[in-house]
Image: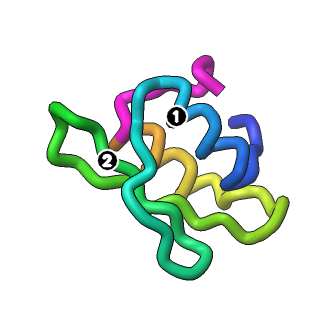
Amino acid sequence: MKTVSGKQLCKVLEAKGWKLRRVRGSHYIFGYSDNPTILTVPVHGNRDLKKGTLSQLLKDAGLTEDDL
């Protein structure tokens, strides 16, 4: 699996139509207009997301590794 930072994932989510709802500390909360799912992306500088975190966020967003 590719490694990406939280900042990079935020850019991908916004390109796919997810909207930034709010920011609380270092966590960016995204929502989608037709989907009740809320994604919380940890953004800690340019540190890469852990594999399990990234995989679950992609699954919840309905994205694949190819979308990165």
Outermost residue on the top side: it is 66
Write the residue at 22% across / 35% down.
Answer: 33
Of all residues, the one furthest to the right in this rendering is 46
Near mark 1 (Cα within 10 A), the count class, few <14, some 14-19 or many ≥20, is: some
Could you tell me which residue is drawn at 69 percent across and 36 percent down?
A: 1
Q: Are marks 2 and 1 in contact (CB under 8 Å)?
A: no
Classify mark 1: helix, strand or loop: helix
Picture residue at 51% right of the left edge, 45% below the top: 55
Which of 23 and 62 lies nearest the eye of the viewer?
Answer: 23
Occupied quadrant, residue 40: bottom left
Marks 2/1: CA–CA distance:
10 Å
Label 2 crowd bin: few (<14), some (14–19), many (20+), radius 10 Å: many
Q: Any mark on residue 26, and which?
A: none
42 lies left or right of 16: right
In the image, residue 4 sits, relative to residue 26, either above or below, namely: above
Of the 4 image quadrants, the one containing the C terminus is top right
Question: Of 10 and 55, which appears nearest the observer?
Answer: 10
- In terms of sequence position, does the residue under pointer 2 or pointer 1 come before the other? 1
Identify which residue, 2 or 43, lies in the foreground.
43
Label 2 belongs to which residue? Answer: 31
Q: As drawn, which residue projects farthest toward the bottom?
A: 25
Element carrying mark 2:
strand
Total labels: the figure holds 2
Tell me what residue is drawn at x 52 percent, y 59 percent.
Answer: 41
Please give the label number shown on residue 14. Answer: 1
- Highlighted magenta segment, given as a residue range: 61-68
Classify residue 66 by image quadrant. top right
> Can you give x and y, in whole percent of width and height, for residue 4 in the image?
74, 45
Indicate yes or no whether the magenta region holds residue 59.
no
Kind of residue sitting beneath label 1: Glu
Q: Residue flagged by tag 2: what amino acid is it?
A: Gly
